[in-house]
Image (cartoon, rainbow, N blue to C red):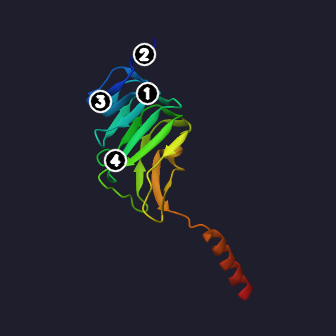
Amino acid sequence: GGAMSRLHWTGGTLELTGGSTDTGLNVSVGGTLAGIGTVGGDVGGAGTISPGNSPGLLSITGDLTQDAVGELLIELAGTTRGSEYDALDLTGDFNAGGTLHVVLLDDFAPQLNDRFNLLDFAAFTGDFATLDLPSLNGGLAWDTTALGTDGTLSVVAAPEPGSVALLALGGLMLLLRR
């Protein structure tokens, strides 16, 4: 087979409103790919990928390769995938290299144990250079450890400084009392 054609544009926003393209895309600096629907081919570049029409699901039948200055913009407004928060489905690989930028919409406040399946992919390579995540309510923290395995971002209890040392000391005291 020959090389797959790829649409290239240099600025502004290309917003999909459903359906699918039969070409891959190259997103330049200053350009944004947004919306819902399916891109029929590989996507790459240094611009912004913003799934959804606030929020929604964007699908790519191919690989997504993110340049170092590229950004994946994810909006969270609830816990239902594709309707209350943005998600990106790839049939191919996600080659991370830029920024994951997550924003909260409509005063949404994630709660303990909330899970957001942001990405589905065949394989994950590279890593995000930057994680730009919103601050959470007191006592909560983002767990990003599963992003590269199953594309999930979770909310966990923030470890309190020194609590691990106190637990160890408490256990030692119990042993000494025996």
Q: Position of residue 134 (x, y in %)?
A: 43, 51
Helix or strand or loop: what does disc 1 sit on? loop
Task: Say few, some or many: other residues with alpha carbon within 10 Å of mark 3 (under 14 / 14 to 19 / 20 or more).
Answer: some
Could you tell which of marks 2 and 4 lies nearer the N-terminus? 2
C-alpha gap between disc 2 and disc 4:
31 Å
Mark 3 or mark 4, whichever is nearer to me: 3
Residue 46 appears anywhere in the view: yes
What label does residue 62 carry, if any? Answer: 1
Residue sitting at x 29%, y 52%: 106
In this rendering, the answer to whether 85 lies above or below 53 is below
What label does residue 15 carry, if any? Answer: 3
What label does residue 4 carry, if any? Answer: 2
Could you tell which of marks 4 and 1 lies nearer the N-terminus? 1
Could you tell which of marks 1 and 2 lies nearer the N-terminus? 2
In this rendering, the answer to whether 172 lies above or below 134 is below
Helix or strand or loop: what does disc 2 sit on? loop
Which amino acid does the dot numbered 4 rest on? Tyr
Q: Residue furthest bottom?
A: 177
Helix or strand or loop: what does disc 4 sit on? loop
Q: Position of residue 29 (x, y in %)?
A: 44, 26
Residue sitting at x 51%, y 29%: 67
Confirm or deny contact between disc 1 and disc 2 (CB under 8 A).
yes
Q: Position of residue 113 (x, y in %)?
A: 43, 61
Give the residue at mark 4.
85
Task: Say few, some or many: other residues with alpha carbon within 10 Å of mark 2 (under 14 / 14 to 19 / 20 or more).
Answer: few
Which amino acid does the dot numbered 1 rest on? Gly
Residue sitting at x 36%, y 58%: 109
